[in-house]
DNA sequence: AACTCGACCGAATGATCGGTCGGTTTTTAT
DNA sequence: ATAAAAACCGACCGATCATTCGGTCGAGTT
């Protein structure tokens, strides 16, 4: 692995665990066996380093969901949404550091002043919501989903699923045992009458 | 207002907007017209200052929900849960800084090493979940709620409601328009069949 | 052999960090 | 009125921060 990639990987882990301001360049230097000068040779400053990380995360997530969508075969819209939820839960586990980072505040803080950062975040969330929305829309047509307003329902669903993932990472409760409850809740939400 | 309270109030606001590590004592001193020495006269260090803030938040939230529960009159469990959701949404708006703080990472990070911090967070979440759970349990008895496993359903519901609040604060989307969708989703979740 | 170039290094820099301390003012109790 | 206590101040401290910079080294190119 090139030193540049080693820096990116270590920084992803440190930023996700200790935050942006909580991670010093000296600490990152120690974690990568790269001199601080080397880090600044590859990235023009700390913020630029983070933007590169975020761009990588965006690309990976978008690629993963692209791959997921191509291998898809669901009998109806409802099943499609359910598969998406399962895949999202799988991905948050497989890309733990990356999603931990997305669950912190500083990316959204930086997004207020950094255009690239803002666009990365928007791409990620649009990708996720679009996939949820598509399943709901198909379900509305084939009759497997009765919920109205596909986009809004997608957002509420996403808030619920992501909320469970958060509960899990905060370790206040063992939310891992909640996945089956989550799935039945998704189904109720999509098929239940108002 | 006493200087001590002014420090607490300003620190709550700064910590919630810029994070714990992102807020310096010098900045806090400027924001309160209190010398840095004065801040350390009232709080033995930065962490102690935050723990005091968190203890205040805990007390306020617990008191607010206590007051809410005493003024309650719902016809059944379902309505009770719905009222709780509405009240929670109201509270997150009325206590914006405090909930923003609870939505950041550093309280949970500090909770790993600080007992008081951990207990404050546990009290807050237990209080919220207990109230949701109670409504669900009553609803199960009077027939207005069909969902099983009151505690788990309470957690999924809380994850969903709090997830929407987060979407709102991150300002990636205008989730404020989602409140009506959220309410119908809550109802589906509680009354829908699996 | 001479030159170029980019990866890499680590000591040095000025700014800023959390925290201390000796002293002054204000409040409180007697 | 006075003494003790509590609140308050800001200059100061050593540590650490992000960033800079002069320089080494080895792999191409001519």
Image (cartoon, coloured by chain):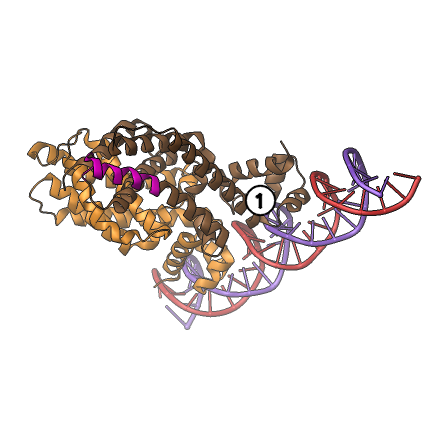
Chain colours: A brown, B orange, C red, D purple
Residue at 43% over, 40% down: B110
Instruction: Confirm whether the magenta stretch covers residue A139.
Output: yes
In the image, residue D22 lies at what x, y percent? 79, 51
Instruction: Confirm whether the magenta stretch covers residue A141.
Output: yes
Given residues B193 and B50, the one toward you in this image is B193
Q: Residues within 10 Å of mark 1 (few under 14, many from 20)?
A: some
Q: Quadrant of the N terminus of chain A?
A: top right
In this rendering, the answer to whether C29 lies above or below B167 is below
Residue at 26% over, 35% down: B155
Q: Is residue A92 left or right of residue D28?
A: left
In the image, residue A51 lies at what x, y percent? 53, 47
Q: Is residue D8 left or right of residue A183?
A: right
Given residues A116 and B23, the one toward you in this image is A116
Mark 1 = which residue?
A24
Given residues A158 and D21, the one toward you in this image is A158
Query: Which residues are the magenta region?
Result: A130-146
Question: Which quadrant holds residue A101?
Answer: top left
Q: Quadrant of the C terminus of chain A?
A: top left
Q: Secondary structure at mark 1?
A: loop
Residue at 31% over, 30% down: A83
Asked if residue B65 can be seen in this view, the reply is: no
Majority secondary structure of magenta residues: helix
In this rendering, the answer to whether B171 lies above or below A72 is below
In the image, residue B87 lies at what x, y percent? 20, 49
How many callouts does the rendering have?
A: 1
In this rendering, the answer to whether A19 lies above or below B173 is above
Question: Which quadrant holds residue B151?
Answer: top left
The chain under label 1 reads A
In the image, residue B124 lies at what x, y percent? 29, 42
Asked if residue A15 can be seen in this view, the reply is: yes
């Amino acid at each position: 692995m090139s030193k540049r990639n080693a820096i990116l990987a270590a920084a992803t882990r440190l930023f996700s665990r200790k935050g942006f301001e909580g991670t010093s360049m000296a600490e990152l230097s120690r974690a990568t066996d790269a001199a601080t000068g080397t880090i600044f040779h590859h990235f023009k400053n700390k913020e630029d380093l983070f933007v590169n990380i975020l761009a990588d995360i965006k690309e990976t997530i978008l690629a993963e969901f692209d791959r997921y969508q191509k291998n898809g075969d669901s009998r109806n819209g409802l099943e499609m949404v359910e598969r998406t939820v399962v895949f999202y839960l799988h991905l948050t586990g497989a890309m733990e550091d990356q999603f931990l980072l997305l669950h912190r505040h500083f990316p959204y803080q930086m997004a207020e002043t950094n255009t690239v950062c803002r666009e990365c975040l928007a791409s990620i969330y649009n990708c996720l919501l679009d996939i949820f929305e598509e399943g709901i829309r198909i379900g509305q047509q084939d009759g497997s989903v009765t919920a109205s307003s596909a986009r809004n329902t997608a957002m509420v669903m996403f808030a619920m699923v992501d909320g469970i993932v958060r509960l899990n990472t905060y370790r206040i409760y063992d939310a891992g045992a909640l996945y089956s409850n989550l799935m039945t809740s998704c189904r109720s939400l999509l098929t239940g009458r108002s």
